[in-house]
């Protein structure tokens, strides 16, 4: 931590203000200042996350070269690609300017909630700096030397859809990126339509990656208040028929709900810092349940990092394995079917006008056109379409509506996939 060693500039160091306070108002995602004091250098170091996670100084080209060397090490060992955490955080503003206040204190990037002061700032200077684009081009050039490899970046930003577009367009930066825009508590047909349409409008030649659950947010079954497995199957059908690649989070295929943990079980600093208003991310991180009769759900013989939630045992893999209509069976069937549908893997997407609480779009490729119609409500609905569809016969059992000419009837949370 001295100022004279050969890596003295590998992290982000800054002098205090004359009164000893941090150099600016930047905040950590996990609460409090993003600056921690080091008594040896008598300087602050930057940590956008935990104080035990100091930020590397990517303005130093040696740091960039080392990072790329690490990537090359794994590429030489044959890895298929990289998932890049918080990839828009690499660079910071060299002038260390204060972030302005946010106009709207709202749930936003990286699962940040309203009780977190991080939401009170517009994060103009602490991340998503223009220098990041040039570094991502260097990263992509390296990946291009290894055909068949890929990257997916996690984007947590105040304008994440625009950043996704910037980071994936032109074929010379990330191969794809996902954001937290479908990882919010907000949901419903209008929200889905607006979010997906926005990224499609911005992406041009870029490629999206969609997720409705991950390790940073409440499990989707609880977050979107699913009352039935059919509702979860409708969300799955939407996720797996949008244009782009898909990230599935462990336990989603079992329909797992958010685990309720005691305070003494928490290990996530995020939850411990913001308890009791926010219990952190441990509730979505409990172990995968493989066997309902084994200790720890068959996940491990030793006590795991987090306890298995009692209510998850009944959803274990061995329980759902033999059930034709289970969530696990639906995921297996749909993913197997999707694999053979070129129009879903590569086709364009276009949204159609549709009644409230429904979502209707087409996927098109080389003259083939698939219609996807979703009823995202508790009530049956009728959708008037521009042409009569022919239901795709080999789709999983939970898919199907009733056609009356060009009108399609869907049961609550019903799904139809048809050829037009």
Image (cartoon, rainbow, N blue to C red):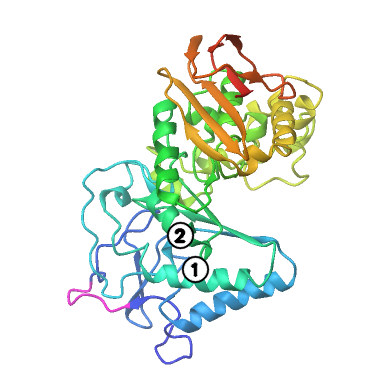
Please tell me in which quadrant of the rendered image residue 145 appears.
bottom right
Q: Tell me: 93 left or right of 279.
A: left
Residue 136 numbered tag: 1
- The label shown at residue 3 is none
Dot 2 crowding, Cα within 10 Å, few <14, some 14–19, many 20+: many
Which quadrant of the structure image shows residue 335?
top right
> What quarter of the picture does the N terminus occupy?
bottom left
Residue 264 lies, in percent from the top left, at: 52, 42
Q: Is residue 199 above or below residue 124?
A: above
Label 2: element kind: helix
Distance from Cα at disc 2 to Cα at disc 1: 8 Å
For this rendering, which residue is in front, 328 or 1? 328
Q: Main secondary structure of the magenta part?
A: loop
Q: Are marks 2 and 1 in contact (CB under 8 Å)?
A: yes
**Residue 333 place in picture, x, y as percent:** 74, 29
| Residue at position x 73%, y 32% in the image | 337
Q: Residue furthest front?
A: 367
Residue identified by numbered label 2: 167
Q: Is residue 378 visible?
A: no
The magenta span reads 14-20
SS type, badge 1: helix
């Amino acid at each position: 931590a001295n100022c004279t060693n050969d890596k003295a500039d590998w992290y982000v160091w800054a002098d205090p203000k004359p009164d000893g306070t941090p150099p600016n108002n930047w905040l950590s995602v996990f609460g409090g200042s993003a600056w921690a004091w080091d008594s040896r250098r008598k300087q602050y170091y930057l940590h956008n996350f935990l104080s035990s996670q100091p930020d590397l100084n990517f303005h130093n080209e040696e740091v960039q070269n080392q990072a790329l060397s690490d990537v090359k090490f794994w590429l030489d060992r044959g890895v298929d690609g990289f998932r890049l955490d918080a990839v828009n955080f690499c660079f910071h503003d060299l002038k260390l300017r204060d972030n302005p206040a946010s106009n709207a204190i709202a749930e936003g990037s990286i699962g940040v909630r309203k009780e977190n002061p991080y939401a009170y700032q517009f994060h103009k200077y602490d991340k998503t700096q223009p220098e990041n684009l040039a570094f991502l081009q260097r990263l992509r050039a390296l990946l291009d030397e290894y055909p068949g490899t890929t990257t997916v970046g996690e984007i947590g930003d105040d304008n994440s859809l625009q950043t996704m577009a910037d980071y994936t367009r032109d074929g010379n930066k990330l191969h794809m990126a996902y954001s937290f825009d479908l990882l919010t508590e907000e949901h419903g047909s209008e929200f889905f339509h607006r979010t997906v349409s926005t990224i499609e409008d911005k992406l041009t030649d870029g490629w999206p990656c969609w997720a409705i659950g991950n390790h940073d947010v409440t499990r989707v079954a609880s977050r979107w208040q699913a009352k039935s497995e059919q509702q979860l199957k409708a969300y799955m059908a939407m996720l797996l028929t949008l244009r782009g690649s898909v990230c599935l989070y462990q336990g989603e295929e079992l329909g797992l709900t958010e685990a309720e943990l005691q305070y003494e079980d928490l290990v996530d600093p995020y939850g411990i810092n913001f308890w009791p208003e926010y219990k952190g991310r441990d509730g979505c991180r409990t172990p995968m349940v493989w066997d309902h009769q084994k200790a720890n759900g068959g996940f491990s013989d030793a006590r795991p990092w987090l306890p298995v939630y009692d209510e998850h045992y009944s959803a274990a893999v061995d329980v759902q394995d033999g059930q034709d209509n289970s969530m696990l069976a639906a995921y297996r069937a749909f993913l197997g079917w999707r694999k053979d549908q070129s129009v879903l893997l590569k086709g364009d997407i276009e949204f159609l006008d549709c009644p409230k609480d429904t979502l209707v779009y087409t996927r098109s490729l080389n003259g083939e056109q698939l219609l996807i119609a979703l009823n995202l409500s508790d009530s049956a609905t009728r959708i008037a379409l521009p042409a009569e569809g022919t239901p795709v016969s080999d789709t999983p059992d939970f898919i199907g509506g009733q056609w009356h000419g060009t009108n399609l009837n869907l049961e609550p949370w019903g799904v139809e996939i048809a050829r037009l």
